[in-house]
Image (tube, helix red, strand yellow):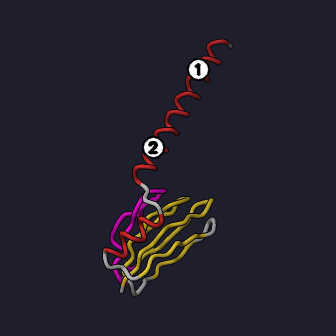
Amino acid sequence: MGQLHLINRRHKNFIEQVIENAKTIWAMKMPTYIEFRDQMLAAGYDEVLERPWAPGTVVPTHTHPFEADAVVVAGEMWLSVRGAPEQHLLPGDRFHLKPNEPHEERYGAAGATYWVARRG
């Protein structure tokens, strides 16, 4: 039983270190909403929005008349763009869609939120 306790403690310490490393990476990668908005407006985008999605939402293939550049800030989603492999996106991941580009979206069990800049 002593060895099992030692293994569990080492495993717990390892997991705690992985979580701390992830937090550090997250802090380095993620801009604040204000920083993202200011960067995207300076890059010529017309508007910047926060888009929350409910858990399990599926948005069938569709298009938008605008260009979109986004960063996932919470939850997880899957994005399928015609002609490319499906992307599994997590907080800190970015995606870009051209105007009128067919795509499909799926959202995870906790839903997802992303910030998106649009133009066009």
Q: Nearer the viewer, residue 31 or 11?
A: 31
Q: Within 10 Å of the Cα at label 2, are there few (<14), some (14-19), or many (20+) other Cα atoms? A: few
| Residue at x-position 42% and y-position 71% | 37
Name the amino acid, label 1.
Answer: Ile
Q: Residue furthest left?
A: 43
Question: Which residue matches tag 2?
Answer: 24
Q: Residue furthest top?
A: 2
Q: Is residue 52 magenta?
A: no
Q: Is residue 71 above or below residue 26?
A: below
Considering only order in the chain, which callout, 1 or 2, is on the residue closer to the N terminus?
A: 1
Q: Quadrant of the N terminus?
A: top right
- Picture coordinates of residue 31, whole percent (x, y): 43, 59
From mark 2 to mark 1, how far is it between C-alphas?
A: 26 Å
Question: Which residue matches tag 1?
Answer: 7
Which element carries disc 1, helix, strand or loop? helix
Q: Quadrant of the C terminus?
A: bottom left
| Residue at x-position 45% and y-position 72% | 116
In this rendering, position of residue 18 left or right of residue 82:
right
- Picture coordinates of residue 18, whole percent (x, y): 49, 36
Q: Is residue 8 above or below residue 85?
A: above
Magenta part of the protein: which range? 81-102
